[in-house]
Image (cartoon, rainbow, N blue to C red):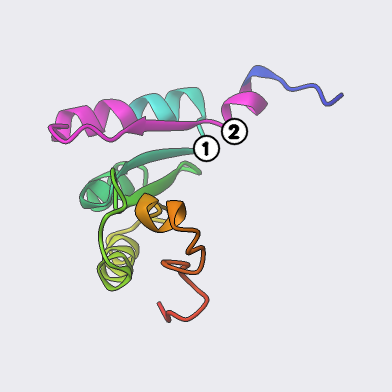
Amino acid sequence: MRRYTIDGLARLVGHTNLHPDATHEDMRVLCDQAKRYHFRMVAVNSVQSRLCSELLAGTDVHTGASIGFSLGQSSVAAKVFEIKDALASGANEIDCVVDLTEVKAGNWKYGVIGQNVLL
């Protein structure tokens, strides 16, 4: 069994704030905590990518953008646009929410970014 130090365990954690009413101050607190505790990343709504990437500049904490949050009920084209925008805004990790309607229908190829979609 692998043993972890507290710091090593923290490096596996994604610190998250996906609240729709999150303020800039909330993002500052999130990023300050991620830096202080050495978390791997912050997970935020894609619109917060620029602010968080600026707040985390010069650190090894990643900025993760949640795409299609929270329902995944947007088209593949919309998700691709959101991914491109998040990356251009400084995100360096992407978490894409699947469309549960398509999952329930067994349509596993729907929305698979990277198979037939060029970023």
> Residue 95 or 25: which is nearer the viewer?
95
- Expressed as whole percent of the image width and height from the top left, the position of residue 104 reads 44, 51
Residue lying farthest to the right in this orientation? 1
Q: Quadrant of the N terminus?
A: top right
> Residue 108 or 60: which is nearer the viewer?
108
Mark 1 neighbour density, 10 Å: few (under 14) some (14–19) many (20 or more): many
Amino acid bearing label 1: Arg
- Expressed as whole percent of the image width and height from the top left, the position of residue 73 reads 27, 55
- Expressed as whole percent of the image width and height from the top left, the position of residue 70 reads 28, 43
- The mark found on residue 40 in the picture is 1
- Cα gap from disc 1 to disc 2, whole angstroms: 6 Å
Is 114 a magenta residue?
no
Q: Quadrant of the C terminus?
A: bottom left
Q: What's the residue at 29%, 46% (across, down)?
A: 71
Q: What's the residue at 33%, 64% (across, down)?
A: 83
Amino acid bearing label 2: Leu
Determine the secondary structure under disc 1.
loop
The magenta region covers 7-30
> Residue 76 or 19: which is nearer the viewer?
76
> Residue 74 or 65: which is nearer the viewer?
74
The answer to whether the residues at label 1 and label 2 have Cβ atoms under 8 Å apart is: yes
Q: Is residue 51 left or right of residue 7?
A: left
The tally of labels here is 2
- The mark found on residue 12 in the picture is 2
Is 19 a magenta residue?
yes
